[in-house]
Image (cartoon, rainbow, N blue to C red):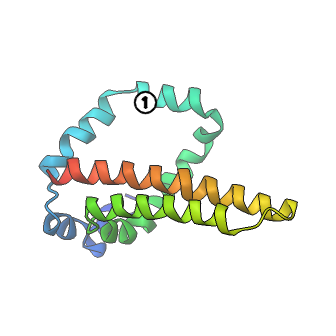
Amino acid sequence: ESTRLLSKVAEAGLLSKAQESGISLTKLEPLLKLAAENKDVMILLEAAAPEALPILPKVVDLAPAALPLLAQAIKISPGTLQGAAAASIAAAGAAVYLIPDDSVLQVAGQTVLGATLGLVVPAASLVGSTVLSKIKA
């Protein structure tokens, strides 16, 4: 109640935007039940990254502020996210090819861009695409 989460959901228009995008609460219900029933997810999270557990309350606190962003993200089509993944991989390849190997700083830049654009962004885009396609189906 103190975070006024439902009020912020209503103010952001999240539910109506989700409905416009083909996402209904009935489609989200199995995902919510799965999350509630599988306490193993928290065990896996703790095993994979125990240092992440202390930040979970902060994530929950920040969630209401992220609702307007989520409302916009729901409108993105899964195909757009898949295209973004491919474009990101191409950009990573271009960065590695175009940035010369003349200094340690340039090689570090290649590494950072290659990892970010070649792995992190495509993985996040493909996961988002999969989630959106399952929710909208």
Question: Which element is circle 1 on?
Answer: helix
Q: How many marks?
A: 1
Report the residue at 36% width, 53% height from top.
128
Q: Give coordinates of residue 52: x percent, y percent.
A: 60, 41
Identify the residue under disc 1.
41
* 52 is higher (above) or lower (below) than 44: below
* Residue 111 drawn at (x, y percent): 71, 55
User: Residue 115: x and y, percent?
Assistant: 62, 52
Would you say 110 lies left or right of 122 here? Answer: right
Tell me the quarter of the picture where residue 82 sits: bottom left
**Residue 137 in view in this figure:** yes
**Residue drawn at x 42%, y 58% as measured from the top left:** 85
| Image quarter (top left, top right, bottom left or bottom right) of the N terminus | bottom left
- 4 relative to 48 in the view: left or right: left
* 106 lies left or right of 93: right
Crowd tier of the residue under label 1, counting other residues whose Cα lies within 10 Å: few below 14, some 14–19, many 20 or above: few
Q: What amino acid is at disc 1?
A: Val
Q: Nearer the viewer, residue 121 or 106?
A: 106
Q: Residue at x 76, y 67 (%)?
A: 100
Image location (x, y in percent) of residue 67 = 37, 66
